[in-house]
Image: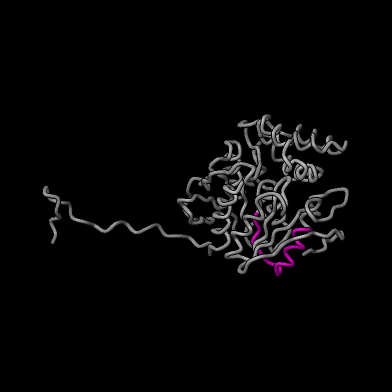
């Protein structure tokens, strides 16, 4: 299926399942044919109506130049219309940033679930602004393979793995969408300088929002999750063992209760991270977002006697 965005570009999507509508937004180099959105959609379809789409320039969707973040928000708005005008939106990596930016403009976004937003907010890793410049230069020169290599190196993939990946059939798929890497750079590079997130950037986003990272997420990304939870204020943090959402005004818990996952290797399309994201997203979409009361104290039991029996009968 496809919709036509405001600038006339066709955006291709799949719809599956029944239930409250959820739109999935992929990160860099990913689309329906490669990445976590398809396996995640299959899992979510058991309880939700799931819309997975190819961001412009990827998969079966069209593209035009010059690129602008506003056009990608228009694309998401078109999918939102297909979902009935209102939906929860979930984003992974740069897709999380796109979803967050879209929520500033689109009132039809009613809830957000953001997984591994790739902000660099301190000195836990070097800034990557120069990397984005080199990636853009490689794309402009038609050196797609170099662009993919530079991106993978920037996100921390070991050189030996990159060398092996270049010998695999999937490398061709990565090259096919390498020209869209600057699109992701346009979303994230201003927040990858090693400086704190801007305090007022997302204050207009007031919908219930969940922010999460994985158990194998690097330290710099966990720090970003903490920073985003603090700056946005409406954020809810998620842990497998503490799955009750917390709203503004609820008793404060540590700002980075995290979804702990076992990240799968890239060859399995990060299915482990997708499962963790599923947990977070399910809670974000299905919860009524009410305050939760603490469990009642345990009932009083008389102390045992020295023979191990209670004094009470």
Q: Residue at x 54, y 55 (%)?
A: 279
Closer to us: 269 or 206: 269
Q: Residue at x 79, y 36 (%)?
A: 147
Q: Residue at x 82, y 61 (%)?
A: 5
Q: Does the magenta segment cover residue 87?
A: yes
Q: x and y percent of residue 166 in the render?
A: 74, 36
Q: x and y percent of residue 43 in the render?
A: 59, 59
On-image quarter of the C terminus: bottom left
Closer to us: 180 or 129: 180
Q: Does the magenta segment cover residue 65?
A: no
| Residue 24, image quadrant | bottom right
| Residue 301, image quadrant | bottom left
Q: x and y percent of residue 241 in the render?
A: 45, 51
Closer to us: 210 or 16: 16
Count the marks: 0
Can residue 182 be seen here?
no
On-image quarter of the N terminus: bottom right
Q: x and y percent of residue 177 in the render?
A: 79, 46
Can residue 14 be seen here?
yes
- Magenta segment boundaries in residue numbering: 75-90
| Residue 124, image quadrant | top right
Check the image and report above or below for 112 versus 194. below
Looking at the image, residue 277 sits to the left or right of residue 254; the answer is right
Q: Residue at x 54, y 58 (%)?
A: 283
Looking at the image, residue 134 sits to the left or right of residue 237; the answer is right
Applied colour scheme: one colour
């Amino acid at each position: 299926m496809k919709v036509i965005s405001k600038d006339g570009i066709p955006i291709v999507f799949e719809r599956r399942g029944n239930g409250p509508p959820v739109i999935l937004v992929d990160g860099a180099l990913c689309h329906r044919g490669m990445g976590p959105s398809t396996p995640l959609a299959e899992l979510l379809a058991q309880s939700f109506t799931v819309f997975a789409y190819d961001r412009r320039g990827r998969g079966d969707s069209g593209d035009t130049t010059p690129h602008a973040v506003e056009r990608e928000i228009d694309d998401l708005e078109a999918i939102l219309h297909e979902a009935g005008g209102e939906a929860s939106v979930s984003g992974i990596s740069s897709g999380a940033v796109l979803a967050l930016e879209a929520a500033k403009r689109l009132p039809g976004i009613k809830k957000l679930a953001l997984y591994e937003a790739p902000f660099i907010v301190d000195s836990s890793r070097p800034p990557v602004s120069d990397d984005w410049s080199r990636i853009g230069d490689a794309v402009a020169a038609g050196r797609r393979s170099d662009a993919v290599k530079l991106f993978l190196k920037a996100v921390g993939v070991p050189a030996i793995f990159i060398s092996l990946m270049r010998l695999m059939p999937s490398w061709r798929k990565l090259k096919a969408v390498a020209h869209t890497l600057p699109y992701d750079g346009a979303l994230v590079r201003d927040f990858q300088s090693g400086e704190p997130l801007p305090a007022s950037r997302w204050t207009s986003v007031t919908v219930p929002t969940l922010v999460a990272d994985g158990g194998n997420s690097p330290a710099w990304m966990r720090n970003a999750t903490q920073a985003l939870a603090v700056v946005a204020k409406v954020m809810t943090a998620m842990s497998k063992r503490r799955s009750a959402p917390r709203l503004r005004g609820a008793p404060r818990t540590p700002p980075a209760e995290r979804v702990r996952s076992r990240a799968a290797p890239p060859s399995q399309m990060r299915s482990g991270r997708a499962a963790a994201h599923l947990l977070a997203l399910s809670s974000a979409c299905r919860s009524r977002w009410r305050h939760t009361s603490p469990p009642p104290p345990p009932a009083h039991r008389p102390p045992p006697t020295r023979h191990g029996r209670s004094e009470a009968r």
